[in-house]
């Protein structure tokens, strides 16, 4: 019996073990997943810091000006009844009672005149965080904001999960690697596209390899790929036709099924199998849109699990028009989202990619349900980069 779509995602994510922890330089950590909570190594800020340009004063004014403090300097204690000029970001001298904004005071003949403010114009040590405080949990994806924050906390490297290494193997004698389709042959659309999708899912991906439709070729290609990668992603051969050799190849290689077909349309003949040596194989259907369905259904949660990230969250959108159900199957319907409203796209056949090229994701109509215009519904987003919309 095929697994339900929701069970397939949960099963794959919950079974895999996260990859080892590595220390990544901040510049190399973008897109990785924190393996341990991020705690600050120091108080933030680490010392009382002036938030304005002006004068640090002690006692009652007016105050004779006795010096200057710039950012990066360690000032001496401020004597009673005196002032020093202070720059934004500079360390506040010990003994300071107030920092006067430069625009709110006057400097005349070396003496500072002004009213003491009702509040301190400096950031106190530890105002943002105290040393040892947990700031971000493990499992957070490292973004440029996280990188900057980590540097702010004193980190030079971050403990992250190693990126999964993925090899893509494309089956199909009818496929052309280049040139115009014709004479019974079609262009391979998945070999060029899948590495890009997989990189957006956090993987380190080798260029796709095309393999002829024989059992020996399948076995050899999968075995070779598994030596170099944590995950082998294949396209085609997931059914039981005359040239569908994936299942026999898995049997010969000692593969064990974790998922063997999913009750979803399109794309149900998809699979995940373990391979000897702790490796994984994700079998995508050969039809291009079905392969993308399998990518978000099985590859995305598997890679998230290996990276130590949570299962990819589903978004909530509102349907702009009706979307029919598919009986006992989950229906994943290509959709484009504008202002939170999802509109299903045309050209949504399993062999078509025109809709995929414009889509933000798949709206999810579960078994026995019908999506009506105005309904709030789940959407499985395609792995697009931030701000990247077709």
Image (tube, grey):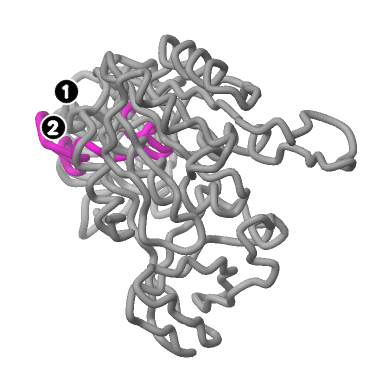
Q: Residue furthest bottom?
A: 373
Give the quadrant of residue 150: top left
Neighbour class for label 2 at 10 Å: few (<14), some, many (≥20)? some
| Callout 2 secondary element | loop
The residue labelled by disc 2 is 95
Instruction: Give the residue displayed 68% in from the left and 33% down from the top.
Output: 192
The residue labelled by disc 1 is 77
Instruction: Give the residue displayed 53% in from the left and 22% down from the top.
Output: 215
Image x and y of residue 382, in percent: 51, 53
Q: Residue furthest front?
A: 242
Dominant secondary structure of the residues highlighted in magenta in the image: loop
- Do tag 2 and tag 1 residues touch (Cβ < 8 Å)? yes
Q: Is residue 108 left or right of residue 212?
A: left
The magenta region covers 124-151
Find residue 64 and name its label.
none
Q: Earlier in the sequence, mark 2 or mark 1?
A: 1
Neighbour class for label 1 at 10 Å: few (<14), some, many (≥20)? few
From the viewer's perspective, is residue 359 above or below residue 328?
A: above
Give the quadrant of residue 154: top left
Label 2 and label 1: CA atoms lie apart by: 6 Å
Whether residue 62 appears in this view of the structure is no
- Is residue 77 or residue 34 the one in the foreground? 34
Image x and y of residue 114, in percent: 33, 52
Screen quadrant of the C terminus: bottom right
Q: Is residue 386 left or right of residue 130?
A: right
Instruction: Give the residue displayed 37% in from the left and 19% down from the top.
Output: 252
Instruction: Give the residue displayed 54% in from the left and 42% down from the top.
Output: 241
From the viewer's perspective, is residue 359 above or below residue 189?
A: below
| Callout 1 secondary element | loop
- Is residue 310 or residue 254 the one in the foreground? 254
- Residue 145 colored in magenta in the image: yes
């Amino acid at each position: 019996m095929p697994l339900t779509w929701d069970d397939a995602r949960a099963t794959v994510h919950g079974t895999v073990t996260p990859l080892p922890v590595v220390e990544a330089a901040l510049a190399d950590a973008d897109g990785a997943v924190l393996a341990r909570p991020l705690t600050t190594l120091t108080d933030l800020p680490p010392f009382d810091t002036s938030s304005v340009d002006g004068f640090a004063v002690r006692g009652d004014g007016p105050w004779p000006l006795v010096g200057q403090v710039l950012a990066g300097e360690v000032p001496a204690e401020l004597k009673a009844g005196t002032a020093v000029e202070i720059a934004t970001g500079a360390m506040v001298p010990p003994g300071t009672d107030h920092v006067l904004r430069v625009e709110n005071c006057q400097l005349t003949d070396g003496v500072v005149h002004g009213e003491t403010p009702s509040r301190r114009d400096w950031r106190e040590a530890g105002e943002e965080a105290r040393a040892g405080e947990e700031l971000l949990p493990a499992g957070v994806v490292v973004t440029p904001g996280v990188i900057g924050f980590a540097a702010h906390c004193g980190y030079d490297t971050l403990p992250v999960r190693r990126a999964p290494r993925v090899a893509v193997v494309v089956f199909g004698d009818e496929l052309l690697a280049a040139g115009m389709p014709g004479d019974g042959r079609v262009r391979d659309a998945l070999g060029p596209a899948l590495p890009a999708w997989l990189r957006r899912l956090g993987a380190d991906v080798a260029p796709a390899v095309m393999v002829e439709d024989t059992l020996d070729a399948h076995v050899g290609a999968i075995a070779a790929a598994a030596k170099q990668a944590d995950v082998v992603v294949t396209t085609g051969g997931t059914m039981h036709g005359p040239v569908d050799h994936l299942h026999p190849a898995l049997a010969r290689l000692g593969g064990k099924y974790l998922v063997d077909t999913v009750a979803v349309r399109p794309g149900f003949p998809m699979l995940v199998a373990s391979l000897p040596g702790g490796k994984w194989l994700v079998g995508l259907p050969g039809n291009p849109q079905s392969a993308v369905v399998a990518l978000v259904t099985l590859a995305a949660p598997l890679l998230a699990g290996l990276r130590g990230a949570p299962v990819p969250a589903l978004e909530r959108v509102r349907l702009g028009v009706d979307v029919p159900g598919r009986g006992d199957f989950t229906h994943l319907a290509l959709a484009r989202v504008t202002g939170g409203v999802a509109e299903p796209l045309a050209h949504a056949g399993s062999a078509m990619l025109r809709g995929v090229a414009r889509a933000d994701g798949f709206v999810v109509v579960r078994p026995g349900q019908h999506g009506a215009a105005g309904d709030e519904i789940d959407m499985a987003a395609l792995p697009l980069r931030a701000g990247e919309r077709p």
